[in-house]
Amino acid sequence: MKRILNCKWELAAPVFGALLTMAFAPYDYAYAAIGALAFIYWIWQRQAPNRAALSGYLFGLGLFGSGIWWTYISIHDFGGGDPYSSIALTALLVAVWALFPGLTGWFIAKTSICSGAWLRIIAAAIAWVAVEYFRGYWLLNGFPWLQIAYSQLSTPLAGYAPLAGVYGVGFLLAVSAFSLVELVRGKLPALPGLLVLGVIWAGGGYLQTVAWTQAVGAPIKVTLVQGNIGQDQKWQKNQKLNTLRLYQELTEQHWDSDVIIWPETSIPAFLSQVKEFYIDPLQTAAQAHGVDLVVGLPSSGQGKDYYNSVMTLGDKQALYHKNHLLPFGEYLPLQPLSGWVLDKLQIPLGDFAAGGDRQTLLTAGGHAFVTTICYEDAFGELVARQVADAAYIVNMTNDAWFGDSSQPHQHMQMAQMRALETGRYLMRATNTGVTGFIGPDGVLRKEAPLFTTTTLTDYIVPMRGLTPYVILGDKGFFGVLAVLLLVMYIWYRLFNAGILKLGAEVV
């Protein structure tokens, strides 16, 4: 009977994985994350490590199956894959990323032997965010989608983002959910447990009122251009001139702005192909009107290298090349195996070169800014290490690859977190949406409708100053967690040895 009951709970794991997806955009049931995390932690505390790994894997299948199903759209609708190959590749991606909640379950089940409730909670929460960090930053150049902190932008926990970043918010969310489980299990005394939870959430609410950065100049009038060029039309040769004409006409309507920003690869041709008849006249017009243009286009490098680039026109003409490339979309990892597999499936994908870490910041509107292309804005440290000399952040992307799905909304959440972590305004110019202005508080202040050819204009304020997170970084935060875990471990060892008597009633 006990085995049957455990099996039933494991079968429920994918359902609660899908429940966690509901905490993210566009659904935005933020507190569903607490229920999902509490359920899976409760299961893991009752299971041996190997069984917990299986439960975690099933949880991951529910999470990623419901959360990144849109990869099918990019592979099939726009990547040219046949339905069977596209389903197979999407299922493979879900199966691979589901391994990480499984790994988390294995680690957390190992912590269940800890004699102290707080030690179990802290160790388990660290395990959760550590696995997220490995998945989100290191493996295959990182895939940080559906990290739990992004679901909390509308809750008091968002107040901790300028202090500890996305992993700090995720850690405190996990601590909150796991503490509730220990309270229900009777392993954590009610008064201390509720007091700690109250301090965490009330503290986050207070921190949301703190301004970590300051204005450094007058407001800048910025226009974002959303061309809404269908992905199936964007690279058609017979559509190139129409696309170029569209962006030029939309731009000419806003010569009264200080800065005009186009989306990623808004110019569907290499720089060398359009420089004389398109770029040079744009440069002249921008200078004549005192406007800075920020445009996206591919460019060639030395030899066979080519880049996904951003170019500024106007007062200063310069290039930024995308550095953090999308695996299987912009470069092929695990060569030659990945190339052979994709050739067999007849799915054409790009192979760009990375621009490098030491690129000079671009300038527009009289201020330097951090440039992120596509999903570069999903990496907190990438932005944080450049923001000291930047007054604002620009993200230029093309989420048309994923159609009318949850992906563009999830991507906007990640951009909101970058603004909040750094205390900077962030502008997102996208091909089909979500195009918008984000304030230093992470709030989406203005957005354009999806799948509409339009422009969006607003004023931003250049900012200066460094948040604690920018100074500390992700690695520094994990160093703090390591010290915390060590202190907790020593405390419990001393307590169990009878050396410490104080606080026995709260551990």
Image (cartoon, helix red, strand yellow):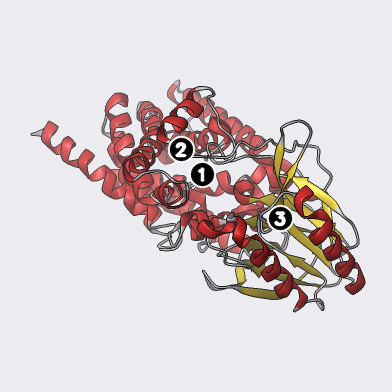
Could you tell me how far apart the alpha carbons at marks 3 and 1 are, in whole angstroms? 36 Å
Q: Residue type at mark 2: give it.
A: Trp
Let me know if residue 183 appears in the view. Answer: no
Residue 271, how many percent across, how many down? 76, 50
- Mark 2 surroundings: few (<14), some (14-19) or many (≥20) residues within 10 A: many
Let me know if residue 494 appears in the view. Answer: yes
As drawn, the label of residue 296 is 3
Q: Residue type at mark 3: give it.
A: Gly
Residue nearer the viewer, 28 or 312? 312
Instruction: Mark 3 vs mark 1: give the one in front.
Output: 3
| Residue wearing tag 2 | 128
Instruction: Mark 2 vs mark 3: give the one in front.
Output: 3
Looking at marks 3 and 1 on the same chain, the residue that comes earlier in the sequence is marked by 1
**Is the residue under label 2 in contact with that under label 1 (CB below 8 Å)?**
yes
Q: Residue type at mark 1: give it.
A: Phe
Residue 336, how many percent across, how many down? 53, 22
| Residue wearing tag 1 | 171
Left or right of 415 in this view: 111? left
**Is the residue under label 3 in contact with that under label 2 (CB below 8 Å)?**
no
**Element under label 2?**
helix
**Element under label 1?**
helix
